[in-house]
Amino acid sequence: MENLQKLIRYYFNYSVMKDALPFLLKGAVLTIKFSVIAEFFGV
């Protein structure tokens, strides 16, 4: 029973991460773009 709960928790975390990953990647790309643009314009 304990192993089943672990498996469910692990699977839940995995699916949540899989859903969140694209948003995190987009945020990281936007942050990098913004810092490059800011550096380029000397902001």
Image (spheres, rainbow, N blue to C red):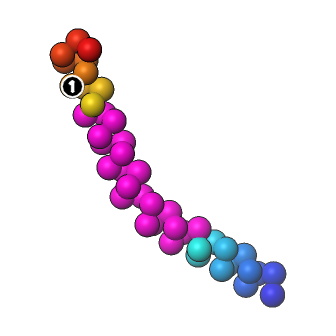
First to last magenta residue range: 13-33
Q: Position of residue 9 (x, y in %)?
A: 67, 74
Type of residue at label 1?
Answer: Ile
Q: Residue at x 81, y 81 (%)?
A: 2
Instruction: Quarter of the image for the C terminus: give it.
Output: top left
Residue 41 appears in which quarter of the rendering? Answer: top left
Q: Is residue 10 above or below residue 20?
A: below
Depth order, front residue of 6/33: 33
Instruction: Quarter of the image for the N terminus: give it.
Output: bottom right
From the viewer's perspective, tell me whether residue 9 is left or right of residue 3: left
Seen as rendered, the residue at the extreme right is: 2
Whether the magenta-drawn stretch holds residue 19 is answered as yes
Q: Residue at x 58, y 75 (%)?
A: 11
Residue receiving disc 1: 37
Q: Position of residue 12 (x, y in %)?
A: 59, 74
Depth order, front residue of 42/7: 42
